[in-house]
Amino acid sequence: MKLSALFGSLALVLIVSGCASNQHVYSSDGKCLTCWNNPITGKPINHDGKANQEQTAQESQVTQTTTTETTVVNTTTAKPTEHKIVFTVPVNVDVAFLKIKKEFNYYTEQEIRQEWGSMAEAKMQTFAYAYDATPSVYYHMRADRNHDGIQAIIDSQIEKQSDKESKITITYWLRDKSVNASQFGESLKNRTRKALNI
């Protein structure tokens, strides 16, 4: 009898001292097995009452990290396909530039710097942005834009053919393979001609 009482006392001392040094033992569902509460008041005896909360918070962080990593791994992007449409309009190259720039809300380098601030350089290095101008001769603009409810990279080049005529080349990249590329291009052409009042 004395031997079992001695072992029981030793086990109790080990459990209490383990908990006092913040080395609690937890079950698989996050419950503290070595934490003791007063059976009458319910207040903690050998812990500060935060042991289960800390364990639950740690498990929650692990779950969130795992979920985030899984989401990133499963993310895929389709490579866009390139299409082009070319036509001539009876409009001066500078006038055509101003109207097309406004219609598609293209940004100059200065406008990008004002809009994006310190991130402007990074923005201008992306494929979805281009801007080049030789006034009265040639203009080139590109941006990621929405047209007819479809997101696409739209590139407009305007070249002088004569004082009253310009060549328009619209190159566009579609991510959605189900979009009819020729109809989309024709719609871009019509939108451009409408912006030029033709």
Image (cartoon, rainbow, N blue to C red):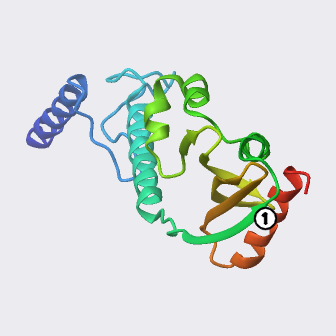
Kindly identify the residue that appears in the image at 48 percent across and 62 percent down. Answer: 75
Point 34% across, 23% down: residue: 47
In the figure, is residue 3 to the left or right of 103?
left
The structure residue drawn at horizontal position 65% and vertical position 62%, both measured from the top left corner, is: 169
Q: Is residue 197 above or below residue 58?
A: below
Q: Position of residue 6 (x, y in %)?
A: 11, 35
For residue 35, what is the image quadrant? Answer: top left
Instruction: From the top left corner, tell me how far across and down residue 15 is, in percent.
Output: 21, 34
Badge count: 1
Please tell me whether residue 186 is drawn above or below residue 130 in the rendered image: below
Element under label 1?
helix
Residue type at mark 1 is: Lys
Residue under the point 91% across and 52% down: 197
Quadrant of res 189: bottom right
Percent position (x, y) of residue 58?
A: 38, 39
The answer to whether residue 113 is seen in the rendering is yes
Q: Residue furthest front?
A: 162
Asked if residue 67 lies left or right of residue 165, the reply is left
The residue positioned farthest toward the right in the image shown: 197
Tell me: residue 160, above or below residue 1: below
Up-down relation of residue 42 to residue 153 (above or below)? above
Quadrant occupied by the N terminus: top left
| Residue that badge 1 annotates | 189
Instruction: Work out whether residue 180 can be spotted.
Output: no
Q: 14 or 161, which is in the foreground?
A: 161
